[in-house]
Amino acid sequence: MSKSILHMSHWGAFDAISDGERILNTRPYDKDPEPSPILYNIPSSHHHRTRIDRPYVRSGWLENGPGSSSRRGKDKFVPLEWNDALDLLAEELKRIYSSFGAESVFGGSYGWASAGRFHHAQSQIHRFLNCMGGYVDGVDNYSFGASNVLLPHIIGSVNPTLTENPSLEAIANHSELVILFGGIATKNAANNAGGISRHNTRGWLKKAHNNGTRFILVSPLQDDIAEEANAEWIAPRPGSDTALMLALGYVLISEKLVSKEFLNKYCIGYEKLEKYILGNEDGIPKTPNWAETISEIPAPTIWKLARDMAAHRTLITVSWSLQRTQYGEQPLWMGIALASMLGQIGLPGGGFGHGFTGSFIGHNPRTMKVPALPQGKNNVNKYIPVARIADMLLNPGGSYHYKGKVLTYPDIKMVYWCGGNPFHHHQDLGRLRKAFNSLETVVVHDSFWTATTRHADFVLPATMSIERDDLGIGMGESELFAMKSITKPHGESKDDYEIFSELAHRLRIGKQFTEGRSVTDWLKCMYEKLRLDLSEMKIQAPSFQEFWDIGTYQLPTEDAPQSMLKKFRDDPTLHRLGTPSGKIEIFSSTIESFGYKDCAGHPKWLEPKEWLGSDITKHYPLHMIANQPKTRLHSQLDVGDYSQKSKISNREPLRMHPDDARKRNLSDKDVVEVFNDRGSCLAGLLISKSVRPGVVQLSTGAWYDPDENGMCKHGNPNSLTADRPTSNLSQAPTGQHALVEVRKYTKTLPKLTVMDPPSIVK
Ligand SMILES: Nc1nc2c(c(=O)[nH]1)N[C@H]1C(S)=C(S)[C@@H](COP(=O)(O)OP(=O)(O)OC[C@H]3O[C@@H](n4cnc5c(=O)[nH]c(N)nc54)[C@H](O)[C@@H]3O)O[C@H]1N2
Ligand SMILES: Nc1nc2c(c(=O)[nH]1)N[C@H]1C(S)=C(S)[C@@H](COP(=O)(O)OP(=O)(O)OC[C@H]3O[C@@H](n4cnc5c(=O)[nH]c(N)nc54)[C@H](O)[C@@H]3O)O[C@H]1N2
Ligand SMILES: [Mo]
C-alpha cells in the first residue's frame, strides 16, 4: 500500500491514498475538528465519464470556421491531437488579436477553479492574455458585487468586512445578542477560497450559546444557522429586510435609544435618514406596523427586538446573499446605519458584521501576504462589472451606468474561459446562450464536460488539483500546505500552465510567459519569496525541500478581530475612514449626486420587482431562494457521490413548506416543474417545515441540462433567475431571488444528458 498524501481543496485539507491512478482512500485532515463531507465528491468524480480526456473542437466550428452559431450547446465535438488543437488555436488567437485587437477578447474568466496558489486558473489566464497584449476584464464579483461598490462610499472600503468581522471567539466572549440577517449557515462555512485547514463554526456557536449569547436568525430558511446556536427564528418575506431594519430604527428613535454621541462623533448624514424613517421625507413613517405589512413580521416582535438590541451588547450581521438581490445595496447600508444608531460599532462583540460565510472567521488571521503568480500588466482599460457579461455580448457599443459614470460595452469577438463556469454562475441562462451564440470563437479549459464547455468551440482538458503539485493556503488562513499530486493526470489532460506555455511558444511569447521555469521552479521561487519576507520578520522558515517533506508550515498570526472598525472607534482622526468625510456616511452626497433612483443618498425601502408583495405573484406565487448548495461548491464535482446522494430521481432537490405542497397536491419526492416567464426546470421535491411558507429553495450548481425547448432537465435555478442588476450604481448580480410556480411533472421523465459526455465525432 502506498503512503497517504496530504492535499488541499476549497472545502478542506485531506489525506489520500492512491495506486498512482485511482484514489483508494480519502480521509479529512486530522487537525480539522468539523470536516466537510464535500470531500467525498473528489474520489468519485476523479475518473467520471464526464472528465475531458483530450482536446476537442466543436464540429460546426471546424466545418464553417469562426462565427456566430446557434449550434453552440447542441453540437458534436471532434477529438484532436494536442499539437493540432494548439496549432489551430494559436492561429485563431493571432487572427483575433491582429484583426480586432486585444479589446475584442473577453478574458475576465470569473470563477473559483481549484485551490492552489500557482495553478490558480485566473492568474494563469490573465498572465497569458497579458503577454498577448491584454484583454477585457470583469471587475467586482458574484459574491459581494454590490458591497464592493457601495462600501467605499459608506465606510471607505470593502476591506473591513473581509478582515475585521468579529471572530466567533469574540462573539462567544463578548456578544450578548447576535442578529443574523441571512444567517451563518454551516453549509456555507464548509468552503473558503483557496482552502481551509480547520472547520469550527459549530464548536464556536455552541461555546457562545453556552456562554449565554442569544442568536436571532432572520432568514427564510431555519437551517441557516447550526442547531448548536439554539437560535430564535424570524422569517420575513425575502427581500423585505430593509423595511424591517428601518422599523427597528423607528423604535430606537421613538424610545430615545439612539446613540447621538456615536452618530455625532463617527457618522455623517444621520439626520436625513431620521427624517426618512419618521416619514418627514415621503409622508410614510417607517413604523413597526408599516414594516409588518411588508415583512409579515408582527409589529410587537419588532418593538421588542429593537429594545433588546439597545439593552445588550449587540452584533448585527448581514450575509452576502442579501445584497445578491435587486437593490441589494439597501439592506447592507441600512444594517450599518442601524448598528451606528446603536452606537456599538468598534466595541468587542458588538456593532456590524458582513459576509459571515468564510470559515476563517474565528481563526487568528495571518499577518502577511502569501505569494501569487504575477499576472503582468493589462494594456486594455476596457472592463465590465462582471455580471454584465450577457448584456455586453448582446449590446456591443451599448451604454450603461456604473459608479456614477456612463460606460460603453466593447465589441467582443472571442471569449476565453479558464477556471469558471458561466453556465453555472450567470443568471437567465437561456439569455446567456443567445449571448454566447453571437461570438466568433469560444475557448474553455476545464476538467469536466460542464455546460460551459458544451457551449465552447475549443475545449482543452485541464488537470484536477489532485493531479499536480502546488502550494495551498486559504484566504485569511495561516497554515501553508504542500499540495502534492496524488495521482497522474486523467487521460491526456494537462495543467493550465502547460497548455498556456505550449500556446505561448507557438505565439512567440513563450519566454515572457514561462520565464524559463518549470512548475517546480515556480513553486520554489514562490516559496523563496515567502521565506525572504519571513526572514525580514526575523523568522527562519525551513528550506523548500524541508517544507515539502514535512507538508505544512505555520505562518505568523495576529489576534482574532474583536470588532469591525475598532481602530476607527479608538482614534477616528488617526484612523479616519476613506470616505470623503472620513466618517461612516449614513448619507452619501457622492451617491446622491449620481441621481440614481435605484440607489439614493441614504438607505431606503425600495420595492423589488420580484418579491411576495408584487403583482407577479398572481402567476408566480412562490419566492425561489437560489442559495449556495450544501453538497458541493457551486457546480464543482456535481457528479461526485456526496452531491449525487442528495438528488431525487436524479434531479436537484427543491424544498417547499408543507402548506404550499398541500395546495398543489404535491408529495415528498415528486418530480416537479419549476417555471416562470423566463424559463423552467425540473426538480425533486422535499417537503420541509424549515422553509418559510411562500418560499421554495433550489440551490445553485446542478449542471445545466437544457432540452430542445430550453427546459433544464436537471434543476439549475439560473434557468429561472433574472439577468437584472442590483442598481445602476454597482451593476451587481441578483441571482438569489426569483418568483416561480411549481407543479407536478406528469410526463415521462427525460434522461439527463449532462451526466454523459457530448456526442463525439469519430
Ligand atoms: N442564482 C444564483 N447564481 C449564483 C449565485 C447565487 O447565489 N444564486 N452565487 C454566485 C456566486 S457567489 C459565485 S462565487 C458564482 C460561482 O461560480 P463559478 O466560480 O463559476 O462556479 P464553479 O462551479 O466553482 O466553477 C469553477 C469551474 O472551474 C473548473 N475548474 C476547477 N479547477 C480547475 C482548474 O484547475 N483549471 C480549470 N481550467 N478549470 C478548473 C471546475 O470544474 C468548474 O467548472 O456563482 C454565482 N451564481
Ligand atoms: N457549501 C457551500 N458553501 C459555500 C459556497 C458553495 O457553493 N457551497 N459558496 C461560497 C461562496 S462563493 C460564497 S460567495 C458564499 C455565499 O454566502 P451567502 O451569500 O451568505 O450564501 P447563500 O447560501 O447564497 O445565502 C445564505 C442564506 O441567505 C438567506 N437569504 C436569502 N435571501 C434572503 C433575504 O432576502 N433575507 C434574509 N434575511 N435572508 C435571505 C438564504 O436562506 C440563504 O440560505 O458561500 C460560500 N460557501
Ligand atoms: Mo461567491
Image: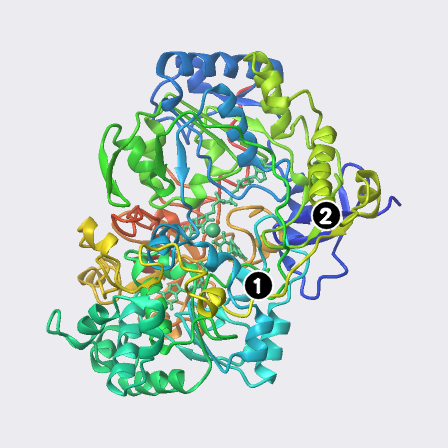
Residue that badge 2 annotates: 481
Q: Is residue 388 visible?
A: yes
Residue that badge 1 annotates: 361
Secondary structure state at the residue bearing disc 2? strand
Q: Residues within 10 Å of mark 1 (few under 14, many from 20)?
A: many
Relative side of 698 to 46, left or right: left
Percent coordinates x, y for residue 262 in the rendering: 36, 75
Q: Residue at x 80, y 44 (%)?
A: 547
Sequence-wise, the earlier of marks 1 and 2 is: 1
Secondary structure state at the residue bearing disc 1? loop
Q: Indicate the amino acid at tag 2.
A: Phe
- In the figure, residue 361 lies in which quadrant? bottom right
Extreme residue in the left direction: 283
Q: Indicate the amino acid at tag 1.
A: Ile
Residue nearest the viewer, comparing 324 with 586:
586
Percent coordinates x, y for residue 603 in the rendering: 26, 64
The quadrant of the picture occupied by the N terminus is top right
Q: Is residue 25 visible?
A: no
Q: Residue at x 57, y 82 (%)?
A: 209
The quadrant of the picture occupied by the C terminus is top right
Q: Residue at x 32, y 26 (%)?
A: 438
* Mark 2 vs ligand 1: CB below 8 Å: no
Q: Is residue 675 above or below residue 432?
A: below
